[in-house]
Amino acid sequence: MGHFVKFLLPYKDDNGNYLSSDSQATSVIEEAKKRIDAGAKGVAITYSANYGQTLEIHKTYNAGDWNTHTGGANQAGVITAMENFMGTTETALQGKLQIAPITTMSYESNRYGDYTHKEVVEADLKYIKNLLDQGWDVLGWINQDTNPEYAVGGGVAKSRDQYGKPYFPKELSDLVQETFKKYATDHI
């Protein structure tokens, strides 16, 4: 059985200067290598994804590939840097370091295909549970702004859609936070 751990990944240093995506990605890579060397089957890091990214991440992994080509700002910039390293200096991590998306929003007028947003998030949580059950360690991303809570649903997902509804409603945020806390207790 894998472990679900809080993983503090600051985006600013002690002086308030922003840390580069490369620097943050290096921290993720070093933690992943340490955990794999200690016996983890693989390591995944939680990530606030939009629905399109979630679909692409799963499509990539289901095809046996490792590079999801995730792009964007904030957390996505760190994921991009992580995958860039995996394509150059950290090729041994291909297939062993992955993204565990939590779908915080959809850019398509809150459309989630045949599913509700809650059903998509529940599937995301089940995916993480399956990784844990298969012996993967999952890094629950936190930063200095979210600590002790997990960094899920910040940035654009905190804003509201054209109807004034939050992209990532509080009830879904609460569901993720509580489930992650349970995973951290059940998968020490």
Image: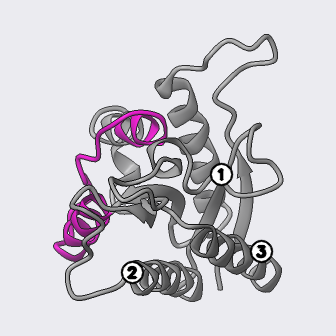
Say whether disc 3 or disc 2 marks the residue closer to the N-terminus.
2
Residue at position x 56%, y 85% in the image: 129
Q: Nearest the camera: 78 or 159?
A: 159
* Numbered circle sitting on residue 181: 3
To which quarter of the image does residue 79 belong? Answer: top left
Left or right relative to 38: residue 136? left
| Count of numbered circles on the image | 3
Q: Nearest the camera: 87 or 147?
A: 147
Q: Give coordinates of residue 87: x percent, y percent.
A: 27, 39
* Numbered circle sitting on residue 34: 1
Range covered by the magenta-colored residues: 51-80
Q: What residue type is labelled 1?
A: Lys
Dominant secondary structure of the magenta stretch?
Answer: helix
Residue at position x 58%, y 57% in the image: 152
Q: Which amino acid does label 3 sit on?
A: Lys
Q: What element carries label 1?
A: helix
Q: What residue type is labelled 2?
A: Val
Q: Residues within 10 Å of mark 1 (few under 14, many from 20)?
A: few
Nearer to us: label 2 or label 1 = 2
* Numbered circle sitting on residue 120: 2
Above or below residue 146? Residue 104 is: below
